Image (tube, grey):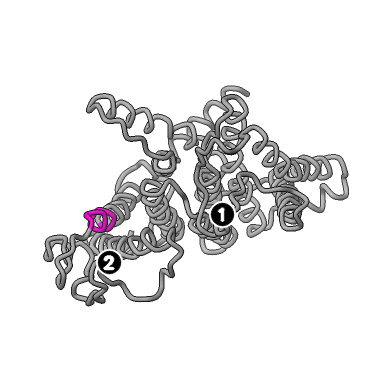
Amino acid sequence: MSTVPDWIWISFIFATGCCIGSFLNVVIYRLPRGKSIVTPPSACPGCGNLIKFYDNIPLVSWLVLGGRCRKCKTKISVRYFVVELLTGGMFVGLFLLYYHTTVRASMGDFIADKSWFVYALHLILIATFIAASAIDLELWVIPIGLCWFVTAAGLICSAVGGYVMDYHFVSGNFLLPVASAKVAAMSGGAFLGLIISFGLLMTGILKRSYVNPDDNNEADQGVGGDDSDNYNHRLEMLWEILFLLPIIVGCVGSYQLAARNEAVGQWWLNASQVPWVAGFTGSLWGYFVGCAVVWATRIFGTLAFGKEAMGLGDVHLMGAAGAVIGPVMVVVAFFIAPFFGLAWAAFQMFFKKTRQIPYGPFLSMGIFSVMILNDTVFRYLITMFYIGQ
């Protein structure tokens, strides 16, 4: 890996994770409440006293103060300590799994192969999804801004990843999403369709689903499920289907154009395999596939049962994950997530608890699982495909 001793790397990563966890606590509290995550400085919610730097040391300060404000003794939620410890622990855990086990041998060397780039991207996803899950647990809402942040990180890192690392190393080991010419064509067409759909929304030609006239900040704050009986849920799904139609038409149309027109096909074949284009469109396709698997479940579930099935926040969450881990892994994650949900249901039954929790945390656990099992899943799929030939 490098001449730096492992314990130094682990200590540094853990400390960094805990510091990021401290910032995530700010995000978890302020973002869904429409407050700035930058200003003002952290203060006690009880007395409003600004928290001194020595009372804001991750993990240590909470333990030293006994989970209370130094001045007014207001109780500080244990969530602050848990989020910091969880973030630091997951940062270190991922490092150990990637570089000290054979689980993700495809990552190569942290320094020599520059796979720290992919590791850092995965840390961004993990940290953001910890915040999204915590907010979802508390308020049943996933701020779209968090999902867009991860999506942007996935698109940018996938585009430049082939230049930071060896492009063949990236594509050959499935470290970042990379699109073939056909997939790149579908991705580009779907993106054009998405622009058209947003244009129809902005001009008022297409109506938004589940519009609440009393909530003008829904798009800014986040999207969660709405259990209100004031909506005709099947009718609301019609608006979402209409929103998706230009995306589907653009995807299919672009594929057909590239496949049937020889001149266009040859030009696109050359252009689409430039590393940054292949990476960007591969990440974009992962975004669309991640959104699609949840959105399809949402639409068909709502049409079947007449009640909103899954929230749009889950759609954005899986889209963001797809932009980072790619289309194949995000689909696998979607089908793994219910097992975590079943485990929680069994826990509830065993301890006779009745409290339900939103689905975002289960999706996040499924995503984390496939990040670790990436090599195993791809080996299985490649073997299955080879046998099928």
Residue 89 percent across, percent down from the top left = 27, 53
Q: Which residue is pictured at 19% across the width and 75% down the height?
A: 54
Instruction: Give the dominant element type of the magenta stretch: helix, strand or loop.
Output: helix
Q: Front-most of 188 and 174?
A: 188
> Which dot, 2 or 1, sits closer to the camera?
1
Q: Is residue 382 magenta?
A: no
Q: Is residue 291 above or below residue 199?
A: above
Q: Residue furthest top?
A: 388
- Tell me which amino acid carries mark 2: Pro
On screen, residue 347 versus residue 164, left or right, reads left
Q: Residues within 10 Å of mark 1 (few under 14, many from 20)?
A: few
Callout 1: SS: loop
Which residue, given by chain and number where applicable, does mark 2 sit on? 45
- Tell me which amino acid carries mark 1: Asp
On screen, residue 221 versus residue 75, left or right, reads right
Q: Front-most of 216 and 199?
A: 216
On screen, residue 341 versus residue 9, left or right, reads right
Callout 2: SS: loop
Q: Is residue 195 above or below residue 58?
A: above
Among numbered discs 2 and 1, the one appearing first in the sequence:
2
Can the viewer see residue 172 in this picture?
Answer: no
Which residue, given by chain and number where applicable, does mark 1 sit on? 214
**Residue 357, labelled with which disc?**
none
Q: Residues within 10 Å of mark 2 (few under 14, many from 20)?
A: few
Q: Which residue is pictured at 29% across the width and 55% down the height?
A: 83
Residue 204 percent across, percent down from the top left = 75, 54
Report which quarter residue 236 is drawn in. Answer: top right
Residues drawn in magenta: 77-84
